[in-house]
Amino acid sequence: MSSDNDYEYELDPEPNPDGTSESLIEVDDLSVVFQKQTILQDINVSVLRGQTIAVIGESGCGKTVFMKTLVGLIQPTQGSISFDGRRFDEMSMTELTQTRKRFGFVFQNAALFDSMSIFENVAFPLRQNEVVAETEVRDRVMQHLMEVGLPSEVARKYPAELSGGMRKRVGLARALILEPELVVYDEPTTGLDPIMSDVINELILETRRRYPVTSIVVTHDMHTARKVSDRVLMFYPRRRLGPHESQVLFDGSPSDLEHADDRRVRQFVRGEAGERLKEMSLQSEG
């Protein structure tokens, strides 16, 4: 494990005493095809409870499609996804809606409502789902803003008045307000300076320490992948693979990335163009 992850821990391989499955998400033979273009093919992944998994790979490799399919926003062309032992395709719409309440999303651009105050943005999931009485909403919102390092006066402001890093933190507070079992981060550090990027990384780690969550972090940022994750999945574009190659080029610990057997993994991690530059030259000539 990378030395800059101060919160490394080992998952207990024994069955949980309450009888729940150690695996929270099961992906079996997953394929997704859009307009005859195969984006994902034959993906098999098991996500254990409490894990933080970084999903990396170059643009166009299917990371975002995988993330959306993982939480039931995209229907697989083939295969299945199970959450807590239940397959999405066997759930009714009511059951699927209830299951999604167990997810928290931190969007790349924060996806805040511009016309709402920060307080109203963070309170929105509570009010939408009528989880707590209105008298409790204020306490919950202010607590979560505090946990992401935002002062109380921010609650009265509007998204346009905040910096990019502050908006990201508001997005995290909103994602956690329902105390989800699964938190999905979509490029959480994109567009931020190195210092603010590391603030977000620390908040991801702190979230894992404070709450019993499982996390999926989709990122291009190798510092983020190394620092916050227990496990890294690296996807590769299906169109550039051989007929029998797995689309998941790497599945292992962050500390093993630099020494991966696959040359393409090592080149991506080190930011080296490698064979990709030759491929692009051949494409332009063609």
Image: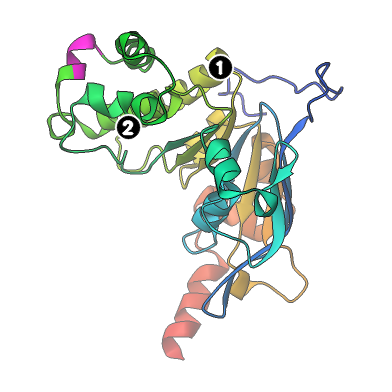
Q: Is residue 10 left or right of residue 139?
A: right
The residue lying at 38 percent from left, 37 percent from top is 189
Residue 107 visible in the picture = yes
What residue would you read off at disc 2? 168
Q: Nearer the viewer, residue 4 or 135?
A: 135
The secondary element bearing badge 2 is classed as helix
User: Residue sitting at 52 percent across and 42 percent down?
Assistant: 97
Using the image as rendered, state which of residue 202 and residue 166 is in the foreground.
Answer: 166
**Disc 2 residue type?**
Lys
Residue range in magenta is 151-155
Report x, y in % for residue 238.
62, 70
Category of crowding for the residue at label 1, using alpha-carbon neighbours closer than 10 angstroms: few (below 14), some (14–19), many (at least 20): few
Q: Nearer the viewer, mark 1 or mark 2?
A: 1
Mark 1 or mark 2, which has the lower sequence index? 2
Classify the position of the N terminus by image quarter.
Answer: top right
Identify the mark at residue 211; answer none if there is no mark.
1
Camera-nearest residue between 142 and 123 = 123
The amino acid pointed to by label 1 is Tyr
- The reply to whether the magenta stretch includes residue 49 is no
Report the residue at 15% width, 36% height from top.
115
* Relative image position of residue 21 (x, y in whole percent): 79, 30
Q: In the rendering, at what x and y percent does residue 124 appear? A: 32, 29
Q: Please indicate, yes or no, whether residue 57 appears anywhere in the rendered image.
A: no
Q: Alpha carbon of mark 1 to alpha carbon of mark 2: how far?
A: 19 Å
Residue density around tag 2, few if under 14, some if 14–19, many if 20 or more, within 10 Å: many
Residue 154: say if magenta. yes
